[in-house]
Amino acid sequence: MATSVVLEDLIEIPFLDSLAEFRSWALSDEFPERGRIDFIAGRIEVDMSPEDIFCHGTVKTEIVAVLGQLVKQGGLGYLLSDRTRVSCPGADLSVEPDVVFLSEASLESGRVRLVPKATSQSDRYVEVEGAPDLIVEIVSDSSETKDTRRLPAAYARVGVREFWLVDARGERPVFEIRRIGAADYRSADRDSDGFQHSDVFNASFSLARNRNAHGRWTYDLQTRPNS
């Protein structure tokens, strides 16, 4: 009787019956070190495709750089990226988003909590449990349906305050700030210059893209603080 599934001779996934079992596996030494592996409503989704440098990697770096400075300068909390696991039992969800922001207020209130490493060493944490203040997902060819449909619905169910969607694959990059409503996300209005307001940062943002002197795409996450 089979006890696991092997994909492309690269990763081995055991048969798991619940989010709790998946979380235990994800924090174990047996969890694969490459690829993005998410648990969404009882379904394990694996993405082994390489990161597209100028449609994913550089735009993610720009977002992290700009938001990281805002968070640091304001002492707002913690900006995390890539291999940060976020688990939300209320939405049957465990994922590794592109970018995550946790405010100090959410940590103090217990809205989110940091899961310590099994060694019990102080200041060692390996997972976020609960609803972060912000999650950013950058669409790739292999994740389009997940990023634009399944994940936003799951993040809304658990109460993530803001969801930012970025798709830089086309002629003009898509950048949307979505704020949580009564049951789903609503896209933020754009002002006359194309800026969208973020309640999380009390600022407005716009994403621009241009080619540099070498003909390659560069990104500029422009920010306007609100009074």
Image: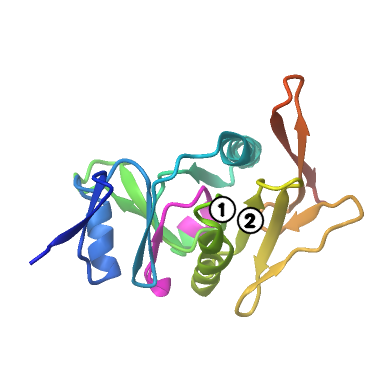
Residue 73 image-quadrant placement: top right
Residue 219: quarter of image: top right
Q: Residue furthest right?
A: 192
- Is the Cβ of the residue at disc 1 closer than 8 Å to that at disc 2? yes
At 49% from the left edge and 70% from the top edge, which residue is drawn? 154
Residue 192, label in figure? none
- State the residue at coordinates (50%, 53%): 142
Binning the other alpha carbons within 10 Å of mark 1 as few (below 14), some (14 to 19) or many (20 upward) gives many
88, 111: nearer the viewer: 88
> Is 101 displayed left or right of 25 in the figure?
right
Label 1 residue SS: strand
Whether residue 144 can be seen here: yes
| CA–CA distance in space, label 1 to label 2 | 5 Å
Q: Which residue is mark 2?
A: 165
What amino acid does circle 1 point to?
A: Glu
* 41 on left or right of 78: left
Q: Which contiguous range is marked in magenta? A: 87-107
The residue carrying mark 1 is 137
Which amino acid does the dot numbered 2 rest on? Leu
Percent coordinates x, y for residue 83 in the rendering: 40, 44
Q: Secondary structure at mark 2?
A: strand
Whether the magenta-drawn stretch holds residue 106 is answered as yes
Counting residues from the N terminus, which is met first, the one under dot 1 or under dot 2?
Answer: 1
Closer-to-camera residue (55/26)? 55
Q: Is residue 81 left or right of residue 27?
A: right
